Every structure is written in C-alpha cells, then in structure tokens.
Image: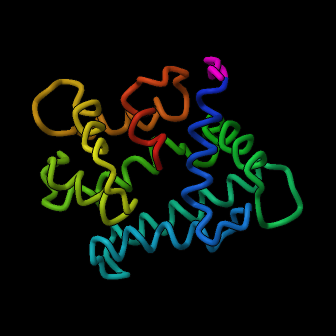
Amino acid sequence: MTTTAQDVVSVKLERSFDALDANQDGYLDWSDYQRLGDRYIHAYQLDKNDRRARAIQTFCQIYWLELLRHAGIDGDRLTKEQFVTANRLAVIDTSRLNVTEGGGHAIFDVIDVDQDNEISRAEFERFLREVWRSEAPDAMEAFTKLDTDGDGVISRQEFIRAIREYYFSNDPDAPGSMFFGRL
C-alpha cells in the first residue's frame, strides 16, 4: 500500500508514539514523557541541576501538557490517534510553546556535548545509540541527510530545520523525515 502525501506526517507521528510507549500498553501518559527526559539525562550523565537537564525536563512537561490540551480530553493519557491529532494541533499553535523551536534547541544543547554549536558524527551516533537505542545499520545515513550543507557537522539551523520537516513535511525523503521518523 502506498502512503499518500497527506499521510506521511501521520505515519511519522505513529512511529514516534510506538517508540515513546515504553510499556507498550497502547497509551501515552506523563510517565512516558518522564522516561524520555530521563533517557537524555542518563545518556549524557547530566546532573539534575544542569541547565540542559532542566531544559529537557521542562520541555517534556510543557509538551505533554500541550498535547493533553490539544487532544481535548478529560483524561491524562492518549491513544495513538489522539497523539497524532494533538501533535498536529500543538505544532501549529505556538501561543504557549513552539514545539519545533523549544524542543529542538533543548535537544540540540544536550547532544552538542562539546558545546561548539555543532553536532559531530560521534555526538550524533551517541544520541542514536544511547537516547534512542538505535543500532540500525542505516541509522547514520540520517546524519548525512541532516548535514544539508555537507560540511561534516549538523549545525543548530540544520537540526531545527529537520525538526520542522518532521512535523510539517509530507516528503518522506526530507532529512527530518528520515531521522525523526524512526524515533
């Protein structure tokens, strides 16, 4: 079955749901987002008071609350369908949180271990391996796609652009689709 252009974003979000659903119960709740924040903190051995750890934790909490708000539900957990719908609405409503910018910068700051404002191949590989637990042989192909200017590193602008593409692009071959779609 061929995925239509309109469905590509939904497919990416459904994959994200599956990766985030730690206990595989078919729902996301706050504990799944806490675990996501904790994966960053533990993978990068950040002290809980480190500004990067606080930024990741804060982003996860605000993002979760925005998803609940946009899902329009009374409960505190989301089905896959509710998650997809809420994400689509949350990324276009920047009145409280700009998901692509806020999350992108917080994540970039953690991945950029040497704080040179670039993500090297080694830093990216660590991110895939330790945060997303990805050992897929083609996973590092994403690095090349994200490095759109071909200079051997992923700049902050390239990273943020990839996150935008993840949420907005219907092109399955867009750099953000390839990498973030596997989350």
Q: Nearer the viewer, residue 59 or 137?
A: 137
Q: Nearer the viewer, residue 79 or 153?
A: 79
The quadrant the N terminus occupies is top right
Residue 98 in which image quadrant: top right
**Residue 82 against residue 174 in the figure, above or below:** below
Which residue lies at the image location 47% right of the left edge and 68% below the top edge? 37
Specify the color scheme: rainbow
Residue 147 in which image quadrant: top left
2 in magenta: yes
Question: At which x and y percent is residue 59?
Answer: 51, 60
Q: Residue furthest front?
A: 1
**Residue 55 against residue 92 in the figure, above or below:** below
Left or right position of 73 against 134: right
Question: At which x and y percent is residue 45?
Answer: 27, 78
25 in magenta: no
Instruction: Identify the main secondary structure in magenta.
Output: loop
Question: At which x and y percent is residue 151?
Answer: 10, 30
Left or right position of 4 against 150: right
Tell me which segment is drawn in magenta. Answer: 1-6
Looking at the rendered structure, the number of numbered marks drawn on it comes to 0
Q: Residue furthest right?
A: 74
Residue 76 in which image quadrant: bottom right
**Residue 65 against residue 182 in the figure, above or below:** below
Which residue lies at the image location 72% right of the left edge and 67% below the top edge? 25
Which residue lies at the image location 41% right of the left edge and 34% below the top edge? 178
Question: At which x and y percent is residue 57?
Answer: 48, 69
